[in-house]
Every structure is written in C-alpha cells, then in structure tokens.
C-alpha cells in the first residue's frame, strides 16, 4: 500500500527535489494526464481507490461511525490527485500522515498537524522546482535562486501557520494490540493559494535579509506551469 501511495505522490505531486529537466518532464506528464478523457480518469481513479481500500482493510483499518465508506473516501482523494489546472499545475496538494495516541481524538489531532507539515513540505518542493526551472531558462541568476530556495526551506512553520481551510479527504483508524489508536488522515489544499502564500512568505524573508526580488518573484509565479 505504501509503495502505491509513494508512486502516485511522486508522479503527480512532484514530491522530490527536481532538476530543471525533471520539472519540464513532470509538467509534460501532468498535461498529458489532464488531456485524458474524463471516463478514462474515472476508471483509473475507481480502480486505484478499490485496490487501496482493499489493502487498508486487510491491515485492519476501518472508518468511524457516520463517515463515508473507505472506498468512497479514497475515490474522492484520488479524483483530487488527478485534478489539474489548465497550465498543468495540480489543482490540489494532498498531505497525509499517520499518528498514534491513547485516544482517537488525540491521535487524530496529531495526525492532522503532521499532515499540514507534510503539505508545507510539498509546497516547498513545488517552489524549489519552479526556481530550478527559471534558472535553467535564465530568468533568475543562481545567486537569486539560492536566496529564494533558502528562504522557502526555512519557512515551513510559517507556511503551516498560514494555511487556510484544508479539505479532509480521507480518515480511517485501527486499534493496535497495546490498545493505542492509530489514525490515518489525508487533507487537500488548493495549489494556487498555497503557492501564493509561499510567495508572500518568501518576499518577507528576503526583505528581512535586505534583498528585494519582487519583480523576479512575480515573473517566477507568472511562469507556473508554462
């Protein structure tokens, strides 16, 4: 199950630091997926959701009373994985986390916190990939790019704090042999809002260092997905 999730997250959410060439290939792949017929995507989503739901249930994961069945939750999650803007940027960034606690509520709260941190890490990766791409296109100097990357990598806590409304897309749990509870959550956040927030944070960080790269940052964001 973890292998399936890892493959999807790497392929669709650019969750590794990318070189300029890898960034271009990833964007190209996103655009190709976005062009697939909706019926094809629906089949792909449903099959992936069913397979993962089966694997999770086999491992003892269940949903709390009143929640949607696991298959329905995962169907929603994977539909969001495959949703793209016209420019080829994923419409949503999906963060996930698993946490253990003495009670369900405690474990869930901790899992949500970790999932937001996971989201922040993905936002950092997206920005870093964009910066790498602009350096290759000579839109930023290497020095300017390094300053931006350092700023965004040092801003994880600020990114987490400024996240607006996140969308819970999947939640399940299981009780372990020692009676502790393990909760598994996934949350989604709008990519454009995430990157806009990161842009503002980077501007503030650079200004504190006495650097003003407003025009360069504006150009960087204008070329998202090109």
Image (spheres, rainbow, N blue to C red):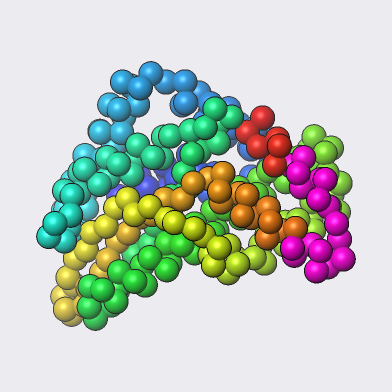
Q: Answer whether residue 62 is magenta in the image.
A: no
Q: Quadrant of residue 38?
A: top left
Q: Is residue 200 left or right of residue 2?
A: right
Write the residue at 32% across / 59% down.
185
Q: Is residue 37 above or below residue 143?
A: above
Please determine whether, in this image, residue 169 is positioned above or below residue 109: above
216 is higher (above) or lower (below) than 21:
below
Near-viewer residue (90 or 57): 90
Quarter occupied by the C terminus:
top right
- Magenta: main secondary structure equals helix
Pick whichever, 207 or 112, lies toward us. Answer: 207
Is 153 in front, or is 64? 64
**Residue 125 seen by the camera:** no
Q: Is 84 placed left or right of 214 in the picture?
A: left
From the top left corner, tell me how far across and down residue 173 is, in percent: 22, 63
Residue displayed at 34% across by 64% down: 98
Q: In terms of image quadrants, where is residue 166?
A: bottom left
Percent across and percent down for residue 86 are 54, 27
Using the rendered image of the protein, determine whether residue 79 is visible from the camera's viewpoint. Answer: yes
Report the span colored magenta. Answer: 204-220
Residue pictured at 25% horizontal, 47% vertical = 73
């Amino acid at each position: 199950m973890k292998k399936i999730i890892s493959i999807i997250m790497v392929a669709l959410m650019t969750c590794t630091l990318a070189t300029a060439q890898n960034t271009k290939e990833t964007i190209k792949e996103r655009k190709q997926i976005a062009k697939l017929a909706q019926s094809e995507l629906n089949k792909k989503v449903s099959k992936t959701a069913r397979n993962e739901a089966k694997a999770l249930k086999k491992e003892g994961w269940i949903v709390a009373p009143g929640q949607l069945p696991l298959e329905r939750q995962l169907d929603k999650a994977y539909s969001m994985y495959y949703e793209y803007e016209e420019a080829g940027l994923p419409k949503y960034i999906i963060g996930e986390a698993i946490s253990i606690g003495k009670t369900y509520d405690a474990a869930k709260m901790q899992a949500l916190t970790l999932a937001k941190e996971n989201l922040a890490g993905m936002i950092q990766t997206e920005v870093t990939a964009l910066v790498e791409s602009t350096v290759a296109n000579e839109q930023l100097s290497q020095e300017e790019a390094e300053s931006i990357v350092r700023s965004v990598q040092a801003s994880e806590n600020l990114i987490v704090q400024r996240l607006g409304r996140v969308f819970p897309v999947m939640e399940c749990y299981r009780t372990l042999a020692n009676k502790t509870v393990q909760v598994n959550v996934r949350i989604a956040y709008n990519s454009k809002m995430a990157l806009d927030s990161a842009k503002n944070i980077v501007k503030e960080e650079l200004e504190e260092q006495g650097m003003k790269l407003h025009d360069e940052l504006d150009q960087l964001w204008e070329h998202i997905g090109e």
